[in-house]
Image (cartoon, grey):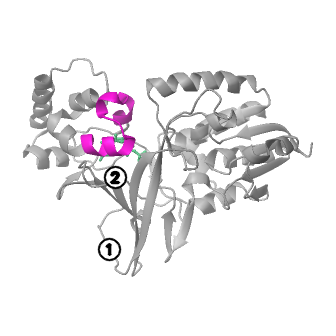
Amino acid sequence: MNYDYLIVGAGLYGAIFARELTDAGKKVLVIDKRDHVAGNIYTEEVEGINVHKYGAHIFHTNDKRAWEYVTKFADFNRYTNSPVANYKGELYSLPFNMYTFNKMWGVVTPEEAASKIEEQRKAAGITEPKNLEEQAISLVGTDIYEKLIKGYTQKQWGRPCTELPSFIIKRLPVRFTFDNNYFNALYQGIPMGGYTKMIENMLDGIEVKLGVDFLADRERLSSLATKIVYTGPVDAYFDYKLGTLEYRSVRFETEILDKPNFQGNAVVNYTDAETPYTRIIEHKFFEFGTQDKTVISREYSSEWKKGDEPYYPVNDDKNGALYQEYKKLADGETNVIFGGRLGEYKYYDMDAVVVRALDVVSKEI
Ligand code: UDP
C-alpha cells in the first residue's frame, strides 16, 4: 500500500477530498480517466475566453462555508445569472418574475400577476401537484407552463412533464418582484481564470495521474491504497449488476464566431419543443469578455447510453428505488466512499457538493 487514499475522479468532490486529506497529513493519489482535471466543471481557454466544455456552471450558494471554501482557491467575479427564454422569437425574462408576467399578460402589479396565476391554477383544477406539470401550473399558471416550461423540460429530460418529479421545477424561483437573478443565493459568481485553474489550485502539490481508468484496472489500482474515494457512476462500479440507472447526457456544438456579440447574454433558453437544442451558451458573457470574437455552444440533451458522458441523474421514483439498492451495496463496501453527482446519483449543485465533501472528509480525518 503506497497511499492512504486513492481518489477516483478529479472533479470538484474528488479535489476537495484530496486537498483536505493532504492537509491532514494523509498520502493521496488522484486518478481520472480523462486527460484533464476538473471533471464536468472543466473550462478551456479558446480565443481568450474560458469555455465551459461540459456545460455552463455558475457557482451560487447561501452557505457561507461553501463560499469561503471555494474563494480560497479562486477570486470570483460578480456574474449574476439572468437567462433569457426565447419562445418562437418572443423573449422572456427568467426566472419567472414581474418582467416575465408583464410580457406574458401585460399585468403591471404583483397583485394582478398573482391573481392571473391563481385563475389559471383554479381552471386547471390542481390542488395538490403530483408531478412536474401540475407543480409548474400551480406555481406560474398554464400560459407560462406552455410557453416556457413544457417544451424545454421535455427536451431536457426526454420525458413528458407528467412523468417527472416536481422538485426539478422547484429549482427555479418564482418572484413577484422585478428581479432577474436566476438564483436565490447570497453569494454568486464565476472563478476568474476559469474553473480548471480553481481545481488545479485545490490539487496543488498533490499527485494526480490522468488518463487512468479505475474500472478498467481496478484490482491493481485498489491495491495501491488503504481506502478509495469513488466519484464515478455508482452503477458502473458494480458492473450494472442490478440494472442501469438512467442519466441524461448532453452533446455540445461549439462554434467560434467572428463577431463580438452573438446573443447579448451568457444563456438563452429555447423553450419551444421544435428547436432541437435546449439552450445556447455564449461563454464570454460569464466573464464580461470584450474579445473581438465569441464562442457559443448549443446544448442537445439525450438519453445516456454506455459510452456517453453522464450529466444528470434522472431522480424519479423508478431510478430512486434502483439507486437505493445500489446504495445498500455501496454501504457494504467498507473501504470505499461514494461521492458526488454520479457516486451518489443526485442532482447536486456545486455548492452542495462542496458542503457534502467537507462533511464526509471531516469524518475521515
Ligand atoms: N426549466 C424550464 N424552462 C427554462 C429553464 C428551466 O422549464 O427555461 C426547467 C427544466 O425542467 C429544467 C429545470 O427547470 O430541467 C431546472 O433548470 P436549471 O436551469 O436549474 O437546470 P440546469 O442548469 O441544472 O440544467
Name the residue beneath numbered marker 1: 261
Question: Within the displayed image, which quadrant is ligand 1 positioned in?
Answer: top left
Q: Residue at x 21, y 31 (%)?
A: 137
Q: Is residue 331 above or below residue 18?
A: above
Alpha carbon distance from label 1 to label 2:
20 Å
Name the residue beneath numbered marker 2: 278
Contact, CB < 8 Å: mark 1 with mark 2?
Answer: no
**Of the residues shown, which amino acid type is indicated by label 2?**
Thr
Q: Position of residue 282 (x, y in %)?
A: 38, 65
Q: Residue at x 50, y 28 (%)?
A: 319
- Label 2: state its secondary structure: loop
Q: Is residue 234 above or below residue 179?
A: above
Q: Upstream in the sequence, badge 1 or badge 2? A: 1
Give, as a single range, the part of the protein colored magenta.
149-170
Task: Determine which quarter of the picture holds residue 83.
Answer: bottom left
Other-residue count near label 1 (Cα within 10 Å), few / some / many at <14 / 14–19 / ≥20: some
